[in-house]
Amino acid sequence: MTVKPDWTGDVPANAPEGVSTDIQVNAGQEITVLASGFIKYGKEEYALAVPDGRIKEGLQTRADNVLKARFSTSGKGYTIGNGVYKWAAPESGTLHLYIADTPTGYSDNTGSFSVSVYK
């Protein structure tokens, strides 16, 4: 892993397609992804989430891993949450990051997560 990230950027909560990091990986290649921040995950005032999950009553994080990754080859989603360290990419392709939500649920989301990717 390099000290300087190969990609940094924001993953918007209201974009179903997420963002492309333009990082090409091969299956089995190790990458590290680190994420931080809060998003508003719905129209309710209390609907907040961190990359690891939604925050529920009592400020407990529900472990539903809001930040996900996919590769251009299959479109299958993989859990990232707050991050993965030296994660062996499960398939080859371009790394895309996105917020997990229902197909019609993105329109009331706001904010973004800050993410860094290291190869």
Image: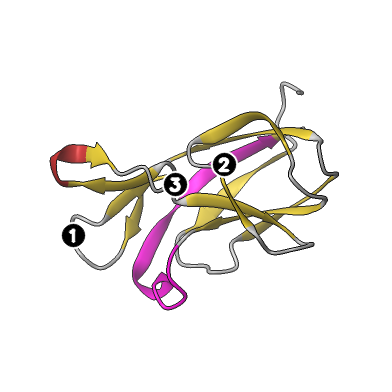
Mark 2 vs 1: CB contact within 8 A: no
Q: Amino acid at mark 2?
A: Val
Which residue carries the number 3 mark?
A: 65
Which residue carries the number 2 mark?
A: 115
The crowding category of the residue bearing disc 1, from other C-alpha atoms within 10 Å (few below 14, some 14 to 19, many at least 20), is few
Instruction: Find the distance from the CA under tag 3 to the CA under tag 1.
Output: 20 Å
Q: Judge whether 70 appears above or below 6 on screen.
A: below
Which residue carries the number 1 mark?
A: 45
Please name whichever residue, 51 or 6, is drawn nearer the observer in this view of the structure.
51
Between disc 3 and disc 1, the foreground one is 3
Identify the residue shown where x is 48% and y is 36%.
82
- How many numbered discs, if any? 3
Please name whichever residue, 35 or 75, is drawn nearer the observer in this view of the structure.
75
Q: Could you say where residue 26 lies in the image, as x and y percent from the top left? A: 86, 44
Q: Judge whether 34 appears above or below 71 on screen.
A: above
Label 1 secondary element: loop
Q: Which residues are magenta?
A: 101-117
Between disc 3 and disc 2, the foreground one is 3
Q: Could you say where residue 81 lies in the image, as x and y percent from the top left? A: 49, 41
Identify the residue shown where x is 37% and y is 62%.
110
